[in-house]
Image: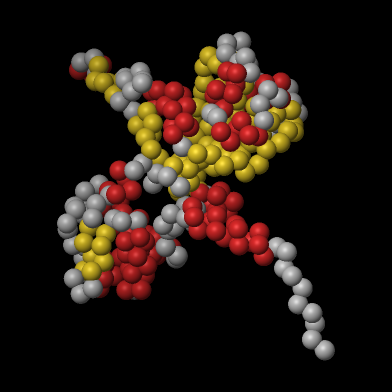
Amino acid sequence: MKRPILPDFGLRERRRNQRFVTMHAHSPLPEGGKARRVYLSLRDGISNGSYRTGDLLPSENRLGELYNVSRITVRRALDVLAAEGRIQKRSGAGSMVLGPSSENSKIAASFTSLLPQLVEIDRQTTAKLLSFGYGPASDSVAEAMGLEKGGRVQTAVRVRSSNGQPYSHLTTHVPEQFAVNYGEEDLATQPLFRLLERSGVEVASAKQSVTATLAGPDVAEALAVSTGSALLSLQRVVQDANGRGVEYLSALYRPDLFRLEMDLARVGTGDAGHWQPMIGAREP
């Protein structure tokens, strides 16, 4: 006797999630460490002008010799470059460089005027709220914000996208006393900076650091990149006029879609000459 076929109530949800991932997918890195190495090397060569628009890349055989890999590995790397619009693969004629197209679509922000620029970027992009809740702050977050150990914070995780491409993964911690004045819907539609101001917070200063990290499985899925992909990591602690910590931000950015810039001016002469940030050079 055959077993009855029961309806799979989770199938619809899995399909919905698959459609979500497909809709936001953006040229993931090729499978395999060797193929990624070839891809990254060629991508950097196109971005920095070593390979100019209209140039032909070396043949697959030659690339295999240069990188000491198989032709199959080279093809995986070239397929991703073609999917990104950086090259055009022509049968029997090699691969022609189209240019660093994705570089031109990067979202750029200046170090010297980052806060107002990020607010403007928030207005021009869309956010998806992944999680939202209240609970005790971790020891590191409490210490950075000057909170009592175990002080309650609102923690929200969002992914921000531009033109359907996810480029940032944002985790924010806000003391409960300020966060109760807005909810999940507000976070999905408005910049947190503005929500804090609406709550009566007078933002006065911020300390931030920038480094690099690798994408873990959850972040990689949210940003439509491969696990282990390099990400730009920014941490910022915002303080109000009384020196209280009002926001702790941990932000992860895709470097292929987001960059930080800084304008510098040469000051002084001789041994005293040095580069100095041009504060406010990019202020709107």
Asked whether residue 85 appears in the rendered view, the answer is yes
* Pick the front one: 278 or 108: 108
Which residue shows up at 61% across the image and 10% down it?
Answer: 242
Residue nearest the viewer, comparing 35 with 179? 179
Q: Residue at x 19, y 53 (%)?
A: 53
From the image, which quarter does the N terminus lie in? bottom right
On screen, residue 254 versus residue 59, left or right, reads right
Residue 31 versus residue 151 in the image, above or below: below
Can residue 68 be seen here?
no
Residue 284, placed above or below residue 72? above
Question: How far across and down, in percent of the image, does residue 171 sit?
Answer: 59, 37
Residue 247 is left or right of residue 177, and the answer is left
- The structure residue drawn at horizontal position 52% and vertical position 21%, both measured from the top left corner, is 206
**Residue at image x 57%, y 11%?**
241
- Which sits in the foreground, 150 or 16? 16
Give x and y (percent) for residue 172.
60, 33
- Residue 154 versus residue 168 in the image, above or below: above
Reply above or below: 28 against 161.
below
Q: How many marks?
A: 0
Q: Position of residue 39 (x, y in %)?
A: 35, 59
Residue placed furthest toward the right: 1
Question: Which quarter of the figure is the C terminus placed in?
Answer: top left
Q: Residue 45 versus residue 121: which sits nearer the camera?
A: 121
Q: Quarter-wise, where is residue 32 in the image?
A: bottom left
Instruction: Residue 75: give x, y in percent of width and height.
Output: 33, 69
